[in-house]
Image (spheres, rainbow, N blue to C red):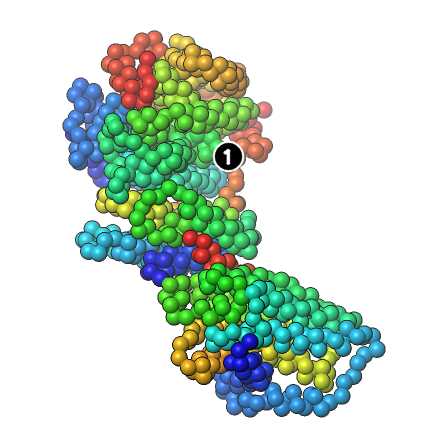
Amino acid sequence: MKAIGLIHYVLALALAPLLLGTINRVKALFAGRHGPPLFQVYFDLGKLLRKGAVYSRTTTWVFRSGPVVALAATALALGMIPMAGQAAPLAFTGDVFVAVYLLGLARFFTVLAALDTGSAFEGMGASREVQFSALAEPALLVGLVALGRLTHSLSLSPAYAGVGPELWSAGGVSLALLAVAFFVVLLAENARIPFDDPNTHLELTMIHEVMVLDHGGPDFALITYGASLKLWLFASLLAGLIIPVRQGPEWLDTAAALGGVFVVGCAVGMVESCMARLRLLRVPQILFAALVFSALAFLLQMR
Amino acid sequence: MSWIDTVMILLVLTDLAMLGSSRLGVYVRLAALQGVLVGVLPLLVGPGRIGLETAFVVFTTIAVKSVLFPWLMSRIMRGFEARREKEPYVGYTASLFLGVVALGVALWVSRHLPTEETGVHPYMMPAALFSIFAGLVLIVSRRKAVTQVLGYLVMENGIYVAGIVLVPDSPLFVELGVLLDLVVGVFLMGIMIFHIHREFDHIDTDQLATLSDWKPAPAPAVSEEARP
Amino acid sequence: MTWALVLVPAVLGLQSFVTRSNTWRRVLLVAGAIGHFVMTAMAWRNLPAPAWGGWLELDAAGLLFLSITSVLFLAAACYAAGYLSREKASESDLEEGLLFTNQPEAVFTGCLLMFLAAMTLVCLSRHLGLLWVAIEGTTLCSAPLIYFHRHHRSLEAAWKYLMICSVGIALALLGNFFLAVAFSSGGRSASLALSSLTQAGVTPQLVWLKLAFVFLLVGYGTKMGLAPMHTWLPDAHSEAPSVVSALLSGALLNCAFLGILRVWQVLVAAGHADFARPLLVGFGLLSMAVAAVFILGQTDYKRMLAYSSVEHMGILALGVGLGGAAVFGALLHAVNHSLTKAMLFMAAGGILAAYRTKTCSGVKGLARAMPVTGALWIAGFFAITGTPPFGVFVSKFIILRQAFLGGHVWIGVAALVILAVVFVGLALIVLRMAQGEAPEGAGTGALRDVAWTVIPPAVLGVAVLALGLWLPTWLEGVLQQAAHSFGGGL
């Protein structure tokens, strides 16, 4: 693995909470408020880590391992995501599927932890989460496979390395379709409006929030950090598509890629401010539309 | 990435959007967009120099399909309370799925059609076949009469694109004749929808089921009852 | 004169949209019909010159179908003049007692004349693209005619007709494109003029030709009423006024048949007709079978006549598919069927006007109450089922004989069985309607024979009888010529 890949990875690990902060700031700006400081999430993480944890007697080791496994899996998956056209630290052929499955593993353990509490609310959130990810995951997978077909490789790093201005001029429509599909999947997987409201306090309307309702203290810190890593993961998947800066010195590419990730964050913030949460009946339709977009991008390769 | 491919993909996207949507207003707007897409095709496909005939055909096609028809449909739907499809025969998600499968089939069939054309853009025939199929699905699986008319328009758009691919130098009179038939046809359909709404207070064609051979005969006629 | 054949009805039709007086409109209608008839008769003496660069030209088949249309329209115009003078502004519906209004007469007569113009264009056109435009034009002109009585059932029938036929004809347009590709060579697409498609020495690409024929058969077959695309036919025929039903069954279905025949002509000229024969025979037998099933136990006599039309269209397709002498038989059958069906529909109109019911069980004692109409009804039944000495017998006999002679024994047997079933079904209904005691009030008021309902169908009936007894040489010559161009002939 190249050093630059490692540097990108460390940058991702360090800057992920900043992305969350950016989104919150953008939402506040749209609402006419000043909003929390950009580094608020770091302060929150620090505060949570200093607290103690309370575990219910009905829970088992599954509950305790949920956040840990989720964070570990997400961090590992993040290691396979390339940035700025360079190879990721953990790149290998077929890492597309491993990355998506690692995310699935993280989700699986989060859901298990939620079910382990024996609470009805968390069970409800778990069932919704699984239902929506059943539709979002194919959209992501088909999209990534389409991208792989477009760039003739089944590994993420060479695939993203191949996404340059030439590919946009040759197969721009497919990439545009993929970008839209990935954006929708990003919103769905990271519990953003219009799929889920991260700020709601009503348990009946939560999906992701309600699954982690009973975690507190360090566990919640791990969960928050894991969520920010997941957001960074999807954002850099999308930014790699839409910011095809691949030439020049590496620091320029890196800066452009980082800028792209934060642009995606701002876009998420804008979408969250302008839309309301969809009725739950509509969510499968939107996710299916994302799947259709990915499938269309895939089919367009079949000339 | 040529313009033609972009136009074709936009055509496919509008078809998919129509398959997945349930609002009549959305259908009308998408049909207008399709009219523009389909109308500019002769300009993109044709030889470098654009003749007067081609320009005339393009102008009339866009005027008819993107201006006249949406205006007609909107006027007729003025005062309709029900602007959404409820419970179509084939649901929206299923329609979208069917659409994606059909797109795959259209791509496969187009690859195997023996066209020896040179420079035929590879997406035109699949987009045309897919539009025809999408139009047919809209006609068959939806209940509102307006949707059926718009499905017919989508089908005609697909056939028009197929015509551009297969018969690029069609005589002007035939093109105009087809367009004229389309205009009169849609006008007639629009007038009939207006009458249907006035008569029934709705435009659900599944309620138009009085005439049938599968039901028992209606009540005996007057002359029977008049007899003691 | 070629242009005059189309333009005279068209102009008169447009004129009748704007004419205010009802009487003048009916005069226009009958005058247009007479003028068209005279021009067609003149065309029998010497064929008019081609017009519009060869796109409009009368050949033998075109002349045949044009004359059928013209004769039928003349009879229909006279009938319609009387019919319109009798229709009140608003009436109560027969089946459900609703009040409804009628379409403005201007629209009715205007559309009738435009309908004639469109059908003439179909018969005249020698360019398949123009043929398509004309056939779609006939759909558009006849849809308002179905919606004459403005109530919900006729609206339903008109909507079904418009939608189904438009979709079918749109598929036929796709077939036209495939045909052009099949005959293209060297990058230029072929002209769809019949003369260039049927040239000797043209080698079309077989895949495209087959695709084209299938699409055109299904598309124009929808218009023609072949099962399983016939679903609009019974509704449209039962809800339209009888004169319109007569024209639809007698003239319009023939025009759609002419569309299929033109494509068949191209196939025959290219020497590839054999793959299509099973298709035609299959559709023909299916139409006959479906019609037979629905005629048995039919409760509405106009729907019964509509299904009988489906059956006869099946016989036409069967005849062309069998080839040889059966093609001659099919063309003769087209003539006979049109005359007979028009007579039957007009008689049905008279029955409807008199008895005010559309159900078969509601009509009794027809032979006693309205002797002429009753005689026409029974004669029509015998004629349409192919009983000698009526003309339909001759044409059916030729077709069936060719089936057995050509070795297609099972096809012939199946057709005979179906025809027998149809005979029984029709007999049960017609004879029950005609026999029995006359209802009260017979001979007075509405329940009697009126001149305008009786004379046009009687004339048509006499013509059918005459054709059964004696085939004039001029007609036989034209039939033979037409059959030759479609790959058959006595």
Q: Where is residue A274 in the image (x, y as percent from the top left)?
A: 49, 76
* Residue drawn at x 76%, y 77% as measured from the top left: A64
Q: Name the residue under label 1.
A: C95
The residue shown at (76%, 85%) is A53
Of C465 and A36, nearer the camera is A36
Q: In which quarter of the image is residue A196?
A: bottom right
Question: What x and y, as percent, mark residue B150?
Answer: 41, 51
The outermost residue toward the right is A57
Residue C107: percent from the left, percent from the top? 31, 40
Specify the quadrant that holds the N terminus of chain C.
top left
Residue at (49, 14) in percent of width and height: C409
Which residue: 41% across, 46% down? B110
Looking at the rendered image, the quarter that the C terminus of chain C falls into is: top left
Quick check: B169 above or below C389? below
Side of C276 relative to C265 (left or right): right
Give whichever of C361, B164 is nearer the camera. B164
Secondary structure, mark 1, is loop
Instruction: Find residue C396 and report its image quarter.
Output: top left
C188 up-or-down from C386: above or below: below
Give the residue type that dot 1 points to. Answer: Glu
* Residue B74, percent from left and from top: 39, 58
Number of marks in picture = 1
Q: Is residue B38 left or right of residue B92?
A: left
Residue C438 seen in the current view: no
Q: In this view, does B191 lie above or below C407?
A: below
Q: Is residue C474 visible?
A: yes
Chain holding disc 1:
C
Above or below, A30 relative to C252: below
Looking at the image, which is closer to me, B189 or A90? A90
Taking C48 as reference, is B155 left or right?
right
Which of C118 and C62 lies nearest the eye of the viewer?
A: C62
Query: Mark 1, residues whose alpha carbon is within 10 Å: few (<14), some, or many (≥20)?
Result: some
